[in-house]
Image (spheres, rainbow, N blue to C red):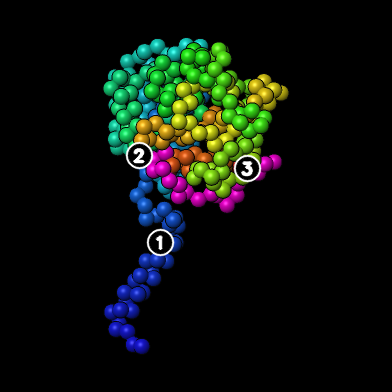
Amino acid sequence: MNYPSLTWSVVLLLVSMTVGRAALGDSPNADKAKLRVLIIDGFNPYHEWQVTTPVLKQLLEECGRFTVDVATAPVPDGYKCSTNEPPPPVDNSSFRPRFGDYDVVVGNYVGPRWPAEIEREFEAFVSGGHGFVSVHSADNAFPDWAEYNRICGLGGWYGRNEKAGPYVFFDDDGKEVRDTSPGGAGHHGPQHVYQIEMRDLENPITKGLPPLWMHTKDELYDHLRGPAEQMHILATAYSDPKYQGTGRHEPMLATIEYGKGRVFHTMMGHADYSMKCVGFATTLRRGTEWAATGKVTIELPPELPTAEKSLSQD
């Protein structure tokens, strides 16, 4: 059959466009609008947030699904606080993040309370159907802000005790335990490589991951407690007594429903080398997408850590 020359020109144009798109490395998500992420940092005692925020930003942006901005809450020079009590108020009245411009907020902040209207805006942002991702020490923040603690589900340090809610962990039979006995919250031993045990491999965030995988050198949080309302634990790690641990299986990954919103909580990620674990990066990306949309389209990387060996990316 003979085709008009104009038709062949159109065909050639379409072919060249397709080849060009492939050469540029278009991902399966190329036809989707990128999700908008806001990382909040500014103060985080005992954590190098100036180092870890750029790593979080890079991990999210390089997968092609997100654009990332950073909002840094002001803290006066020389400000110090103790993990035994909440930070005192400071003048951060200039801190005015525009939550409505974003699909999901990522927390990398442990510092003074925000202005009251900003806290109310944050609560409304999450409960109204958006997402929050609590990374590692972000669950230490704001022990006296009740709604933030409901959003995170669990937290530690800064004066938390039985009034904050139960300890949550898994027993040796794989059953979730909620312990209301009195005591403080938040502890970890020396950093080490440890194994992650998946408790739910049907969740969109974790589907396809190995049932067991080794996480790179990191702190292993234990004795976390909190409201734990509408919380579902996705993964745990054994807190080994030889590393000053509890001898219990402690939560490492969890989701929380807050109103119409979604929260992904990872207890991992103390330092840049911890965040470069392929398992951490994979769950961070997929968890952030899920928190933003309720779905996961980000594919698993071709190589993952195994039950015996951790894996880091450059």
**Residue 248 - label:** none
Q: Earlier in the sequence, mark 1 or mark 2?
A: 1
In the picture, the quarter occupied by the C terminus is top right
Q: Residue at x 49, y 45 (%)?
A: 204
In-front residue for pair 47/179: 179
Q: To which quarter of the image does residue 5 belong?
A: bottom left
Q: Residue 238 location in percent, x, y?
A: 65, 30
Q: Earlier in the sequence, mark 3 or mark 1?
A: 1
In-front residue for pair 285/233: 233
Q: Residue 143 location in percent, x, y?
A: 44, 17
* Residue at mark 3 to residue at mark 2: CA–CA distance: 30 Å
In-front residue for pair 211/179: 179
Mark 2 is on which residue type? Asp
Q: To which quarter of the image does residue 234 belong?
A: top right
In the picture, the quarter occupied by the N terminus is bottom left
In this rendering, the label closer to the viewer, 3 or 2? 3
Q: Residue 267 location in percent, x, y?
A: 53, 30
Residue 40 within the magenta-colored segment of the rendering: no
Q: Secondary structure at mark 3?
A: loop
Q: What is the magenta range?
A: 291-311
Residue 293 within the magenta-colored segment of the rendering: yes
**Residue 211 - label:** 3
- Label 3 environment density (alpha carbons within 10 Å; few <14, some 14–19, many ≥20): some
Residue bearing mark 1 = 21
Residue bearing mark 2 = 103
Mark 1 is on which residue type? Arg
